[in-house]
Amino acid sequence: MNKPQSNNIFKAIADPTRRDILSVLIMATTALSINTISENFSTSRQAITKHIGILHEAGLVEFELKGRERYCFANPKPLKEVQDWLSIYEKFWDTKLDMLDKFLGWE
């Protein structure tokens, strides 16, 4: 894992609002304007813009310019790094739980 990029990804998904923004963009069938994204949240457009900026720094959101408006779309590919990191722990716990099952005679 590339440390600076990985840190940006974890920072980006640490906040529930950013996770919700990413979900909105992933579920959208097209790129969304910042105004459209903001309509889904009770916080200000300025706060949503800041959250989108953090997602963009992590590579999770890309921009497309149409006239004067910036449209956003999700790029979930960087989340593969998180999945790869978590898979190490998933294997660890699967092994430990299998051992516990054997110990308790539940297998």
Image (tube, rainbow, N blue to C red):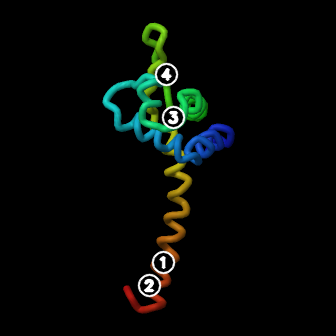
* Left or right: 104, with 56 as reference point: left
Residue 52 point in image, percent of width and height: 54, 31
Q: Tell which circle, 4 or 1, labels the residue nearer the N-terminal end.
A: 4
Q: Residue at x 50, y 30 (%)?
A: 61
Residue that protrudes farthest toward the right in the picture: 4
Image point (48%, 17%), residue name: 70
**Circle 3 residue:** 60
For the residues labelled 1 and 2, say whether their Cβ atoms are less than 8 Å apart: yes
For the N terminus, give its image quadrant: top right
Check disc 1 and give the amino acid type.
Leu
User: Callout 1: helix, strand or loop?
Assistant: helix
Name the amino acid, label 4. Answer: Phe
Mark 2 or 4, nearer chain start = 4
Give the crowd class for mark 2: few <14, some 14-19, many >=20 residues within 10 Å.
few
Sequence-wise, the earlier of marks 2 and 3 is 3
Helix, strand, or loop for circle 4? strand
For the residues labelled 1 and 3, the Cα–Cα distance comes to: 34 Å
Q: Mark 1 points at which residue?
A: 97
**Residue sitting nearer the eye, 45 or 32:** 45
Q: How crowded is mark 4: few (under 14 residues within 10 Å), some or many (20 or more)?
A: some
Per the model, the C-alpha gap separating discs 2 and 3 is 39 Å
Q: Which amino acid does label 2 sit on?
A: Asp
Of the residues under marks 1 and 3, which one precedes in the sequence? Answer: 3
Q: Is disc 2 placed on a helix, strand or loop? A: helix
> x and y percent of residue 71 in the render?
44, 21
**Mark carried by residue 101:** 2
**Rendered residue at 43%/31% (across/down):** 39
Q: Is mark 3 on a helix, strand or loop?
A: loop
Tell me the quarter of the picture where residue 89 sits. Answer: bottom right
Q: Distance between the residues labelled 4 and 3?
A: 10 Å
Q: Name the residue nearer the viewer: 56 or 18.
A: 18
